[in-house]
Amino acid sequence: MAEKDFSWDNQTLAFEETEQQLKEPSMYKVLIINDDFTPMDFVIDVLVRFFHMNEERATQVMMHVHTRGKGLCGIFTHEIAETKMHHVNQYAKDNSHPLLCVMEPI
């Protein structure tokens, strides 16, 4: 087998520096929609459990949902918003509540 010559003949290798343009990820609002059947305490539990709100903040958001029809739970990237939405909807279903959580692009 012949031996290969890997010499560079005094040539240098040049690299072009390119600046990467990173794009901010799209963000989504996660909202809870009011209904006439889900108990207020359950909504507070959801806000504490899935959105890590303290009791006082969760109560404020729950009252906003109750009086205005929907309330903001948080703003997240698409994957996180979608995961939280599915977890909340499944938790509500598992507990026989019609609570609905949705996501909207900002």
Image (tube, rainbow, N blue to C red):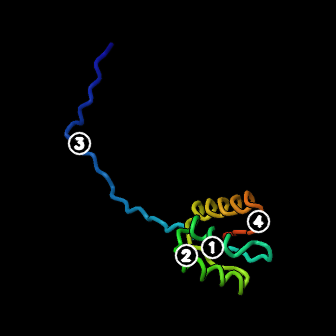
Nearest to the eye among marks 1 and 3: give it: 1
Q: Name the spot of residue 11 as percent of width and height, x first.
A: 23, 42
- Label 3 secondary element: loop
Figure label count: 4
Does the residue at mark 1 contact the one at mark 2 (Cβ under 8 Å)? yes
Q: Quadrant of the N terminus?
A: top left
Vertical placement of 68 versus 16: above or below?
below
Residue furthest to the left? 10
**In terms of sequence position, does the residue under pointer 1 or pointer 3 come before the other?**
3
**In terms of sequence position, does the residue under pointer 1 or pointer 4 come before the other?**
1
Vertical placement of 2 versus 43: above or below?
above
Q: Which residue is mark 2?
A: 55
Alpha carbon separation for disc pair 1 and 3: 69 Å
**In terms of sequence position, does the residue under pointer 1 or pointer 2 come before the other?**
1
Alpha carbon separation for disc pair 3 and 4: 72 Å
Q: Camera-side residue: 21 or 62?
A: 62
Amino acid beneath label 1: Ile
Query: Of the numbered discs in the image, which one, if any, rests on residue 20?
Result: none
Q: Is residue 18 left or right of residue 76?
A: left
Q: Which residue is mark 3?
A: 11
Q: Camera-side residue: 17 or 2?
A: 17
- Label 2 secondary element: helix
Q: Name the spot of residue 86 as percent of width and height, x first.
A: 67, 60
**In terms of sequence position, does the residue under pointer 2 or pointer 4 come before the other?**
2
* Quarter of the view holding residue 92: bottom right
Amino acid beneath label 4: His
Query: Of the numbered discs in the image, which one, if any, rests on residue 44?
Result: 1
**In terms of sequence position, does the residue under pointer 3 or pointer 2 come before the other?**
3
* Quarter of the view holding residue 94: bottom right
